[in-house]
Structure formats: C-alpha cells, structure tokens
Amino acid sequence: MDSWKLLPHPKIEKKGQRLAVVVLDGWGEHSPDQFNAIHVAATPTMDSLKQGAPDRWRLIKAHGPAVGLPTEDDMGNSEVGHNALGAGRIYEQGAKLVDSAIASGKIFQGEGFKYIKEAFPNGTLHLIGLLSDGGVHSRFDQLQGLLRGSAANGAKKIRVHILTDGRDVLDGSSVGFVEQLEKDLQDLRNQGVDALIASGGGRMYVTMDRYENDWNVVKRGWDAQVLGEAPNRFRSALEALHKLKAENPKKVNDQYYPPFVIVDESGKAVGPIRDGDAVVTFNFRADRMIMAAKAFEYEDFNKFDRVRFPRIRYAGMLQYDGELKLPKHYLVSPPQIERTSGEYFVHNGIRTFACSETVKFGHVTFFWNGNRSGLFSEALEEYIEIPSDQGISFNQKPRMKAKEIGEKARDAILSGKFDVVRVNLPNGDMVGHTGDIKATITACEAADSAVKMILNAVQQVGGIYIVTADHGNAEDMVKRSKTGEPINDANGNVQILTSHTCWPVPVAVGGPGLAKTIRFRKDLPGAGIANVAATTMNLLGFEAPEDYEPSLIEVADG
Ligand code: 3PG
Ligand code: CO
C-alpha cells in the first residue's frame, strides 16, 4: 500500500471541503488588563469565535515540552510552533538537542567540531551569535559550554562576536550578559587562552536578518566580524554598550545597537576573521542565521560585496537548511522532521496555498514543512510572499501587511483553486516585540480585520476554518512577579516585556462546511498546537497518520 495515502475518515465525508488555516503570530490568551494588547484592542472577529467555547473554541499549549522545548519555563516561538503545527508531532528541538550534546560531551567528538578543530593550532576560533538566555535562537549557557569545551580541546585564540538581544529577553539585559561573558573570557585568559570579544551589534540591525528581507543587516555584521570595520570602535564591549546608548538613548536599544568593533591600544581591530581561522555561528535556530551562513559558506555570492572572502573552516551550531545542506558542517544534528502534513497533502491530491509577508513567510512554508525550503509539488501548491516594509521598526507601521495577506487569502479561497489556504498574520508578534503597547493594540486590530476578511470568504464558499496561533506575545506585555504583579524597574517604570510568553493560545473551528455534529473533544485537556495537524486532516475528511498527535475534534452522535 502507498504509505502516503491517508485513509478516509469514518465519520467525516471528503467532499471537496475548502479549509482556511489561519495562524495569528504571537496571539495568546491571558487575563484582561491594560498590558494585554489583545484585550484592549477591538477584536470583534476573534471575540466572536470565543463565543463558540467549549465545542468550537478552546485553548491549547504552545510552549515548553508541548513544542519540544526543554522545560515548562521555555516560552514558545515561531520555529518550534510552526514545526509542531505543520508536522503534527513533537520533536526535540535545537535548544534541547544542543543541551544534551554539550552535557554528554558528544558535541566535541562529532564531525563538525573535529572539522573546526583542525584550525586550532594556527588559527583563531570565532564564535558568532545571539548573546541571550532566551532559548529561542541560542542560549548563553550553551555559549559558555562551547567556550570551555573549545579551550579544553586546544583552541588557543578565541574571538566572540556578540549580537545583543532585547527581543527574547528584557531590553537592557545585554549589559549583564556582557559582564558575565567578560568574566568567562578572563577565566580563559588565566588559563593561557587568548580570548576576547571582537565585535558586536544589535540583532535586528546586525547579522540576524531573515528571509532575505534586508541584506544590509548581514553586511553590517560581515564588515565588523570579518573585515574588522565599523563606524564605532571601542576598547571594550561594555564601553560600546554604554556609550552608544548614551549618545542616542531614543534610537539605540539592545535590538538595535549599531555595529561596533573592539580595538587594541593602537586602534587595531582585535579579531577580524582571516584565512585559516574557524568560525562557528552558535545560534541553533535557522531562520536568522541562514543569510550569514550563505555569506560564510558560498564561494559564489552576490548579495553584497564581501571585499575579502577568507578561507575558513565554518560550522553552524546546527545545519540550518536540510534541503540546501547549509552549512555543510555543523556541531549538532538538527531534528529530523519528516512526513509533515503538507507533504501528506500533496500525496493525497490536496491543493494548498500558503501566504504571509516576508518576515513570516518562511514560518508558514519552511518551518511548517519541517525546515525544508521550496514546494513539495509545483502542480498542487502555490506559496505567495508579500514584501514586508523595510528598514523600519514595526511599531511605526503596526498594520503591516495584514490587509494584503487577508486579500490574497480571500482571493485564493474564492478562486476555487485550492483545498487548503494557509496564512500567517504576523502583527501581534512583530509589533509585540517592539514593546510598544499602543502600536500593538493597532496591530491586533489589523490582524482581527484580516481574519474577518478570510472568514467572510470561507462563508461565501461554504468552507471551513481553523484559526489558531503559534505562541503568545501580545496578550502580555509586562514583566510580572511570580504572583502576576507587574514589576517596576529602578526608576519606577513598569518593565515592558518584548518577548513571547508561556500562555496558551486559542484554537477555533467553524464555517458553513463544518457539520453541526463536529466539536472539540473534552478528553485532551493538555493538548497543544501539535494536535492541530491531525485536526486539519480530519476536517478535510481524512484520518491522520497513527503517530500524529491526536485530532482535537470528534463527531458527536446524532
Ligand atoms: C525573532 O526572531 O523575531 C524572535 O526571536 C522570535 O520571534 P518568532 O519566534 O515569533 O519569529
Ligand atoms: Co516572535
């Protein structure tokens, strides 16, 4: 038998259902107060879906072990969230795989580390990545493990190129991370390893662009890290952080520090990347490292003028793109996500349309398909990317491209060319990350209007919808104490939370094509977003594969 063939559902007939799958990025459920931007916003569409509880609206988990993260304290994120939504199963994710590889020491015995180790006798080891304990792209303790292990394995000269966070952790926390890193590097120097911070910059302005939104971001990183060139030159990273902020307190924050290089007493950069060196990008998450990985790895490259292309040994913490095999060398094997719902769909003749704007386009395609670029089938699938606004912080244009995404989805539904129309609406997340509550309220209203447009189209064609989210963000924008009280900073201002949250997310099903007897099961109280994939298969009239997390719906008698 063709193992890709999905069996017909015993109770839900397959009769050409048209299904809209809507993912609101960064849209969790939390108690209503002034820091809950979703609550403050006028969101009539999402509110009306909530009226369907408990049969047609419920909450599901989107953080911690429910999405393959190490602990219940790990907030969800779009990578693991879309992986779970698309694959219907829970995979141990990068954060956990790297933890295990460091704890067991296997990371230092693997092919990737052996490859870079060849450079240690004569070259410098450069570590580039996000300095953060957010656990979304990287984790500080993993960097510490890598530093210690590299020194123990013969690295004599190490340069760290830091990217400050303020997006998965509190703004301003970069100073504490740098202070700790300086202590760790001092320890290494005491052991005879020449270890220093060599350059830095804020993650949103230097290196960590994604989905080719703006190559200038990667170029700024390249210039500082490889060429040792940046407009700002300091004797230490702490001095850089303090002075750059003091010069421009309104514009500069952890996410947006301009690039800087660290120089010695004669003004020379202490750590440009040169022939014979080794480079490790220590982020485990792919989306914001793929562009830099291409710059380090590809001989043929025309995205910006690299000026110098050093002959280096380059490895990623993980392999970032399994399809492109990028990078060739990596320290830890990524999760092997296979048999995703999208792949099943093409094997079962289901026609799929997927759309978002640039900043989330890869989420609803690449992450959804198990970290795989491209289409499964040109004949059956169409993916549309709407260009995101460039060079702005999204609180300046909080409506983003919600309307355009809604229109594309609407047209795809009405065209009759697709069985599944899948979109990601980024507003709650992208604007939530700016920490601007007022703008986030507008963002949520824009996303809600787009949902309305999509549900109207579903109504017109007699279709079905499933509306959910990948993780929380906009529903809680303040740092809270264990008892839930907002926490103030030293100046008495509330500490704004720019990161994701651990709150659950809603899921709603409905539409004229949904039989009256279909409702959410009550026996899966701990279900998470990985249960959504099987649900979509059921909604289309198929049984889900046995190893998928169970479907959220059942057919009531009568
Ligand atoms: C980012 O990369 O923007 C944040 O670190 C995580 O946000 P995302 O998981 O929603 O993309
Ligand atoms: Co986010």
Image (tube, rainbow, N blue to C red):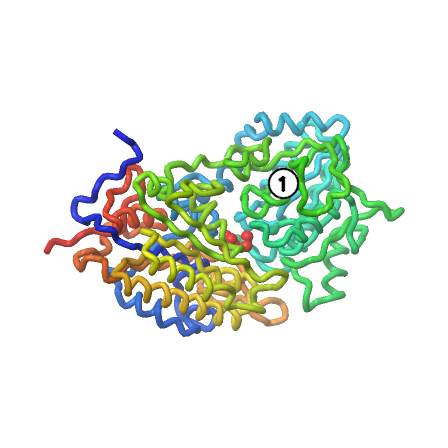
> Based on the displayed image, in which of its 4 quarters is residue 189 positioned?
top right
The residue labelled by disc 1 is 294
Q: Is residue 331 visible?
A: yes
Q: Is residue 478 visible?
A: no
Residue at image point 49% right, 40% down: 96
Please identify the quadrant where the C terminus is shown: bottom left
Please identify the quadrant where the N terminus is shown: top left
Dot 1 falls on a residue whose secondary structure is helix
> Based on the displayed image, in which of its 4 quarters is residue 314 positioned?
top right
Type of amino acid under label 1? Lys
Residue at image point 66% right, 56% down: 205
Q: Residue 294: where, in percent of width, then height?
A: 63, 40
Say left or right for 552 vs 444: left
Q: Residue 362: where, in percent of width, then height?
A: 49, 49
- Closer to the camera in the image, 503 or 19: 19
Q: Residue 59: where, in percent of width, then height?
A: 33, 58
Outermost residue, right side: 266
Residue at image point 35% right, 69% down: 45
- Closer to the camera in the image, 443 or 520: 443
Say left or right for 258 vs 449: right
Label 1 CA crowd tier, 10 Å (few <14, some 14–19, many 20+) = some
Residue at image point 57% right, 64% down: 394
- Closer to the camera in the image, 190 or 9: 9
Q: Is residue 382 above or below residue 546?
A: below
Say left or right for 90 vs 162: left
> Based on the displayed image, in which of its 4 quarters is residue 513 positioned?
bottom left
